[in-house]
């Protein structure tokens, strides 16, 4: 039986919570991000992005009034806060990943207005009330007449991506002027002057300031980063000293709720890594390890994300998680991966992307679920046992505007940022494939910066082989690194069809050679069926990066809410109250049967119809396990993890499919002896 959270890091453990006072030189990340557009998705991943482009990701400004009407980021009096930058943070990379000129033209309206309307002081963003009504010029002396720092942090992420795609010469001077202004303005208008969102998410600001430092080497940017960190939530310290994690299990009230807010936590995850990048202090990385381990132990759910409905809320399989928390945690992991080079964070990123992310939107990417639930036996209106239960009863249904609309604007960065971070560059001018999906990479490698195109041919995570086809004008020597996931005992590499080497799971393997045009490198990652332990003594079935859930035929119903518009409910059409047999849990390789149903082709969609894989398992129904107000509360078990109540005498074969293909399901099963 596979144990929960078997993470293994290369760094030695240190006592958490103590930081050396001495500063060291800025630390270069182990892996460097590639420019936006260097990675072009193909296969099923490209189809996912095309669906998004055709849906709300490409058209939110046409279908969502808050963004559509008199937008503040175009000089109007409408939305000037987070939702427009949130949308652009996914729509802009989508435009360049698909090389879509129409979408590029659309998002560049906002980029160009922002760049062209910076104030002489360096301040930027929508026109403020003081500017409109009192004609005040926003500068460091009048910083208090500005507006919230938080939305600007998101727009800075948009501009950073735009720069990597285009090298527009306006961007770096724009950022420099703003950060110089901010260094002075924070003394009289600190991060928390307007809202606590800025203090809870200040690491987003630190991250971009440090990125600009790598381009300009302006020492004031590191001074700014230190000041921002001092005014922000102390995520790095909290993650290491463990008192914070204990407090998240105790209270569910308004006191300090921002410290438990799952989206804040998801953003804050990268704080220790980014602070390490600035200081070189490895204690930050120890605190990151401690915090991630504790977070997933106390609040982790089988699909690879922590609970957050809206606050962190324990590991019971009936707790929910907000869609914004999923995409923000993914982005934090993508930053952590580059800085630390640690395989467990890469494994965690894939698990979130292939399980938690796809289930929370409709096939057309026009509706989202504010909170998803692991053991979700119906999607419906109701006041559920969430930390923010919503008396409007709309936080569980699938709708464009159901729940809060932050997720409607922010969900677009999940797949786009994942696609951008399939590859990184390495020391020695090499490349590293650290997460896998079909795509084509264009990069310059070796001492002569030879152009190379690497076509990654695979339907991973739905198959266990990844093929890399190299096209280049001349031979070049460079390191080619590949991640071997922690769930894989031993991988095999083949070069041009011939065995090359074996590599152990949980490591980065390097093939360092002179590569030639037409070379083909293949990676074989054998996937075994395992079971993992989760909250309330439940068990989940996994194979490779995919988690498997009970397949239930779905009944969809459409409704309309006067305030939040159209929405969709989903109900199961068959029994869901099954327990896995003890033998299946203890000997999954022998008791559980895996099969490929159909290939995951270029037209793949994350739904039951397209589910390419399945696992059959022996199980028994539990007559006493019934939904209460639509919630399948976990049956009581003893300390050995076995259900002691009545079970059906008949053993049935149940079918499990990838979690991401389901809407209603059981994924955390009780065990029947």
Image (cartoon, helix red, strand yellow):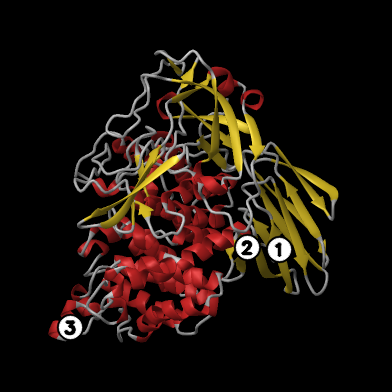
Dot 2: within a 10 Å radius of its alpha carbon, few (fewer than 14), some, or many (20 or more) residues? many
Give coordinates of residue 363: x percent, y percent: 46, 55
Q: Residue at x 51, y 56 (%)?
A: 334
Tell me: residue 635, above or below residue 428. above
- Label 3 to label 1, Cα distance in Å? 52 Å
In this figure, which residue is indicated by the disc labeled 2?
A: 42
Instruction: For marks 1 and 2, give the one nearer the viewer.
Output: 2
Residue that appears at 41% across and 29% down: 535
Horizontal and vertical percent position of residue 144: 19, 73
According to the image, label 1 marks what residue?
455
Q: Earlier in the sequence, mark 1 or mark 2?
A: 2
| Image height of 330 relative to 620, above or below | below
Residue 132's mark? 3
Callout 3: few (<14), some (14-19), or many (20+) C-alpha neighbours within 10 Å? few
Residue 269 visible at all: no
> Residue placed at 33% from the left, 64% from the top?
227
Q: Is residue 636 left or right of residue 671?
A: left
Residue 112, quarter of picture: bottom left
Which of the two labelled residues, at mark 3 and mark 1, occupies the earlier sequence position?
Answer: 3
Element under disc 3 = helix
- Give the image location of residue 590, x and y in percent: 66, 23
Where on the picture, by quarter, is residue 158?
bottom left
In which image quadrant can residue 77 be found?
bottom left
**Disc 1 + disc 2, Cβ < 8 Å:** yes
The front one of 23 and 557 is 557
Against 641, is 567 above or below? below
Image side of residue 387 versus residue 171, left or right: left
Q: Is residue 565 visible?
A: yes
Residues under labels 1 and 2: Cα distance? 9 Å
**Discs 3/1, front:** 1
């Amino acid at each position: 039986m596979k144990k929960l959270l078997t993470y293994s890091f290369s760094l030695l453990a240190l006592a958490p919570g103590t930081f050396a006072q001495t500063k060291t030189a800025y630390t270069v990340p182990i892996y460097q991000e590639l420019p936006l557009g260097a990675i072009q998705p193909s296969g099923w991943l490209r189809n996912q992005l095309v669906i998004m482009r055709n849906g709300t990701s490409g058209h939110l400004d046409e279908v969502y009034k808050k963004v559509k009407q008199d937008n503040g980021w175009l000089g109007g009096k409408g939305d000037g806060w987070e939702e427009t930058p949130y949308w652009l943070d996914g729509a802009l990379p989508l435009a360049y990943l698909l090389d879509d000129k129409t979408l590029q033209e659309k998002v560049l309206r906002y980029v160009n207005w922002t760049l062209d309307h910076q104030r002489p002081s360096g301040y930027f963003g929508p026109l403020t009330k003081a500017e409109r009504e009192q004609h005040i010029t926003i500068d460091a002396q009048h910083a208090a007449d500005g507006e919230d720092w938080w939305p600007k942090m998101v727009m800075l992420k948009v501009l950073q991506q735009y720069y990597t795609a285009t090298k527009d010469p306006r961007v770096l001077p724009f950022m420099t002027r703003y950060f110089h202004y901010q260094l002075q303005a924070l003394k009289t208008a600190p991060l928390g002057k307007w809202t606590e969102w800025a203090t809870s998410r200040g690491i987003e600001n630190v991250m971009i300031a440090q990125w600009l430092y790598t381009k300009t080497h302006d020492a004031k940017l590191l001074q700014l980063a230190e000041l921002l960190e001092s005014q922000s939530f102390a995520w790095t310290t909290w993650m290491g000293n463990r008192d914070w994690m204990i407090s998240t299990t105790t209270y569910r009230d308004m006191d300090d709720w921002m410290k438990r807010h799952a989206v804040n936590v998801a953003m804050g995850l990268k704080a220790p890594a980014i602070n390490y990048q600035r200081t070189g202090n490895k204690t930050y990385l120890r605190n990151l390890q401690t915090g991630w381990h504790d977070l997933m132990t106390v609040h982790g759910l089988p699909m690879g994300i922590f609970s957050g409905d809206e606050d962190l809320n324990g590991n019971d399989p009936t707790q929910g998680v907000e869609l914004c928390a999923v995409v923000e945690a993914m982005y934090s992991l993508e930053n952590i991966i580059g800085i630390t080079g640690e395989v467990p964070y890469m494994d965690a990123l894939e698990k979130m992307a292939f399980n938690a992310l796809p289930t929370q939107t409709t096939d057309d990417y026009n509706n989202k679920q504010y909170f998803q639930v692991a053991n979700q036996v119906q999607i419906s209106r109701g006041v559920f046992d969430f930390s923010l239960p919503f008396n409007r009863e709309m936080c569980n249904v699938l709708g464009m505007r159901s729940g809060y609309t932050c997720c409607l604007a922010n969900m677009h960065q999940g797949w786009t940022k994942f696609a951008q971070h399939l590859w990184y560059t390495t020391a020695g001018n090499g490349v590293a494939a650290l997460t896998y999906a079909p795509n084509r990479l264009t990069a310059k490698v070796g001492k002569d910066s030879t152009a190379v195109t690497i076509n990654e041919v695979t339907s991973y995570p739905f198959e266990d082989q990844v093929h890399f086809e190299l096209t280049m004008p001349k031979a070049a020597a460079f390191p080619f690194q590949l991640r071997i996931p922690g769930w894989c005992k031993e991988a095999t590499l083949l070069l041009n069809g011939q065995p090359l080497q074996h590599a152990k799971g949980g490591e980065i393997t390097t093939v360092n050679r002179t590569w030639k045009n037409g070379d083909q490198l293949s990676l074989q990652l054998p996937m075994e069926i395992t079971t993992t332990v989760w909250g309330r003594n439940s068990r989940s079935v996994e194979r490779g990066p995919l988690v498997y859930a009970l397949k239930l035929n779905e009944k969809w119903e459409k409704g309309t809410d006067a305030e939040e518009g159209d929405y969709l409910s989903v109900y199961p059409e068959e029994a869901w109250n099954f327990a896995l047999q003890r033998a299946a849990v203890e000997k999954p390789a022998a008791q559980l049967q895996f099969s490929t149903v159909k290939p995951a082709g270029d037209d793949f969609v994350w739904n039951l119809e397209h589910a390419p894989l399945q696992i059959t398992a022996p199980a028994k129904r539990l007559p006493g396990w019934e939904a209460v107000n639509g919630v399948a509360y976990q049956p009581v078990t003893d300390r050995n993890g076995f259900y002691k109540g009545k079970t059906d005498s008949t053993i049935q074969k149940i079918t499990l499919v990838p979690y991401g293909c389901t809407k209603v399901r059981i994924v955390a099963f009780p065990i029947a002896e």
